[in-house]
Image (cartoon, rainbow, N blue to C red):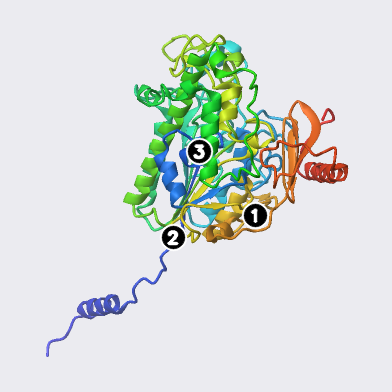
């Protein structure tokens, strides 16, 4: 009998070990992917499923197969809403009470506090991939001290590498990947403060349109992240339809005649669709009086320009929806659509701002990269839509976009703080597809919701910092068709403020600190001020608001 060599014995043993080795029993990670899409300055009735005449089939698809929320709140302005949404805190507690100017007060740092933690940081710690595409706008803006050099920088005619402190960039707040703008206002054809990660993008292709780039990048992230078994969190922060009014000619053409019938006709039609969809109960939310209704459309000397402006606004939303369609397609092709929670909402109501009155400066250029003059046309003589024109829809159209509510962005009335919100998740939502939810919610509530469905943990410490306790309430029960008890809600922004509690809402305008009181559960459009008849309720709610303000670093300065 021949001797078997030691090496052959070892080889046989190794083969047996491999043959009998237990298969990899690591359980598949079945936690949902999360895609959070937020529009910018989108009015409550600006998408089809919330009453609009604007063509938004992809957003409408999410609504038809998900849930439409009727009582959901933002914080009335871009960067405060982003701060609250990202951290699960009221925005002052997160560090952004006003805008992104650096101040020394806790509630007004102008960037996300080091004692806050972002959705991306929490979910990344829980094993999620994380990425963001779009508008950041929650870090201190770094401008150039010399005004001429600042303008050259805005015009892409000089370069400076940092748009805010790098420690405050998205990739240093939990996002593995980021493509988008660090500042707020952009030229859609050639955006300022555009970066990939922390690297400035020095030039863009000739046919560049920023809304397409945001959504195409989001779709690319989905395809990349879908290659391994990890779930992913994707934050898509659209710039559309924030001014300046800039859109592609083929999109504008779809709406060239739509708005020639005027403010009242569009507003009434939107209202009727909202009622038909079950989003608005006409007995509780009659259509509020149109802002400045003393001017009839037929007597409007600027009706051609006004109709064209709203057509561009519509085109910008239409283009955003097309891109959201490509995000949905990427999820479907990657086999991830059914187990992805997709959220869609707006950061505040439509904007009443007249951006032409601001003129160039700070974040608004006066020339294109090639040196063409940018016109800020106060007299409404240049039809908007092109890169060389900065324009906005104005107060009356903003009021229409926020149908049926009063006022707009930056105010605490419903037109400023009430957002359309859609949740879509075939595997996780058991409520009837296309249903309407009366669950009261707020942008800060995404933190608790995502933690619950992702089986994540909210930490007390993170990277050497003590983390503020969350102020977030989970919305997960609403996905099963249930509603949890209403939480008290509060807001303040440049003096505009509200408190909502147990069916009451007390609110004041930015330029008028007088409280008005509404029985909001029966008067959702804030038509009937009942403050005089209910002095005790005014006193109670005012005390609640001041207590909240003191606890959340609101009004830290003596002049307030």
* Number of the label disc, if any, that sits on residue 51: 3
Residue that badge 1 annotates: 473
State the separation of the CA atoms marked 3 and 1.
Answer: 28 Å
Q: Position of residue 476 (x, y in %)?
A: 57, 58
- Note whether 460 is above or below 500 in the view shown: below
Label 2 residue SS: loop
* Closer mark to the observer between disc 2 and disc 3: 3
**Measured from the top left, where is residue 534 in percent x and y?**
85, 43
Point out the image quarter for the N terminus: bottom left
Give neighbour class at mark 1: few <14, some 14-19, many 20+ (Cα, 10 Å): some
Question: Mark 2 or mark 3, which has the lower sequence index?
Answer: 3
Badge 2 vs badge 3, beta-carbon distance below 8 Å: no
Please indicate whether residue 122 sits to the left or right of residue 319 in the image.
right
Residues at marks 2 and 3, CA–CA distance in whole angstroms: 27 Å
Gap in angstroms between the C-alphas marked 1 and 2 = 22 Å
Image coordinates for residue 308, horizontal then vertical, percent: 46, 19
Within 10 Å of disc 2 (Cα), the crowding (few <14, some 14-19, many 20+) is: few
Q: Disc 3 on helix, strand or loop?
A: loop
Is 196 in front, or is 12? Answer: 196
Q: Crowding at label 3, few (<14), some or many (≥20) Cα neighbours within 10 Å?
A: many
Residue 427 shows which numbered tag?
Answer: 2
Q: Residue at x 23, y 81 (%)?
A: 9
Q: Earlier in the sequence, mark 3 or mark 1?
A: 3
Residue visible at 75% across and 31% down?
Answer: 495
| Quarter placement of the C terminus | top right
- Residue 99 sits in which quadrant? top right
Q: Is residue 236 above or below residue 232?
A: above
- Circle 3 or circle 1, nearest the eye: 3
């Amino acid at each position: 009998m021949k001797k078997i060599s030691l090496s052959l014995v070892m080889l046989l043993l190794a083969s047996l070990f491999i043959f009998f080795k237990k298969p990899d029993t690591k359980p598949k990670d079945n936690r949902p992917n999360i895609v959070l899409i937020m529009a910018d300055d989108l009015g409550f009735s600006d998408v089809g499923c919330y009453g609009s005449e604007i063509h938004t089939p992809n957003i409408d698809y999410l609504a038809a197969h998900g849930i439409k929320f009727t009582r959901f709140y933002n914080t009335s302005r871009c960067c405060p809403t982003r701060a609250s949404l990202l951290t699960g805190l009221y925005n002052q507690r997160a560090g952004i009470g006003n805008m992104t100017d650096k101040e020394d007060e806790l509630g007004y740092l102008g960037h996300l506090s080091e004692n806050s933690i972002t959705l991306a940081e929490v979910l990344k710690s829980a094993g999620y991939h994380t990425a963001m595409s779009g508008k950041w706008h929650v870090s201190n803006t770094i401008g150039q001290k010399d005004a001429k050099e600042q303008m050259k920088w805005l015009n892409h005619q000089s370069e400076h590498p940092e748009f805010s402190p790098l420690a405050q960039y998205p990739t240093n707040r939990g996002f593995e990947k980021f493509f988008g703008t660090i500042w707020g206002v952009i030229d859609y054809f050639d955006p300022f403060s555009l970066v990939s990660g922390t690297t400035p993008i020095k030039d863009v292709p000739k046919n560049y349109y920023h809304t397409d780039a945001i959504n195409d990048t989001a779709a690319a992230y989905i395809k990349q992240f879908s290659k391994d078994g990890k779930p992913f969190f994707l934050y898509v922060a659209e710039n559309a339809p924030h001014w300046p009014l800039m859109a592609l000619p083929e999109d504008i053409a779809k709406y060239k005649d739509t708005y020639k019938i005027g403010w009242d006709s569009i507003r009434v039609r939107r209202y009727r669709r909202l009622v038909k969809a079950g989003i608005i109960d006409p007995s509780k939310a009659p259509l509020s009086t149109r802002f400045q209704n003393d001017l009839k459309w037929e007597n409007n000397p600027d009706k051609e320009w006004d109709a064209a402006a709203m057509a561009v606004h519509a085109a910008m939303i239409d283009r955003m929806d097309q891109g959201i369609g490509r995000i949905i397609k990427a999820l479907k092709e990657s086999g991830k659509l059914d187990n992805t929670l997709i959220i869609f909402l707006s950061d505040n109501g439509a904007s009443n701002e007249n951006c032409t009155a601001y003129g160039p400066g700070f974040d608004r250029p006066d020339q294109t990269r090639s040196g063409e003059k940018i016109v800020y046309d106060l007299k409404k003589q240049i039809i908007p839509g092109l890169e060389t024109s900065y324009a906005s829809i104005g107060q009356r159209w903003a009021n229409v976009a926020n149908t049926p509510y009063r006022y707009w962005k930056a105010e605490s009335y419903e037109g400023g703080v009430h957002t359309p919100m859609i949740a879509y998740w075939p595997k996780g939502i058991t409520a009837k597809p296309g249903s309407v939810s009366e669950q009261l919610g707020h942008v800060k509530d995404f933190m608790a919701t995502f933690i619950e469905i992702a089986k994540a943990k909210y930490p007390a410490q993170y990277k050497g910092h003590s983390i503020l306790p969350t102020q977030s309430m989970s919305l997960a029960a609403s996905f099963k068709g249930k509603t949890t008890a209403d939480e008290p809600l509060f807001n303040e922004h440049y003096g505009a403020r509200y408190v909502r509690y147990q069916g009451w809402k007390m609110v004041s305008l930015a330029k008028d600190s007088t409280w008005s009181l509404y029985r909001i559960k029966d008067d959702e459009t804030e038509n009937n001020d009942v403050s005089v008849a209910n002095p005790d309720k005014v006193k109670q709610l005012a005390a609640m608001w001041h207590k909240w303000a003191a606890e959340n670093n609101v009004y830290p300065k003596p002049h307030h």
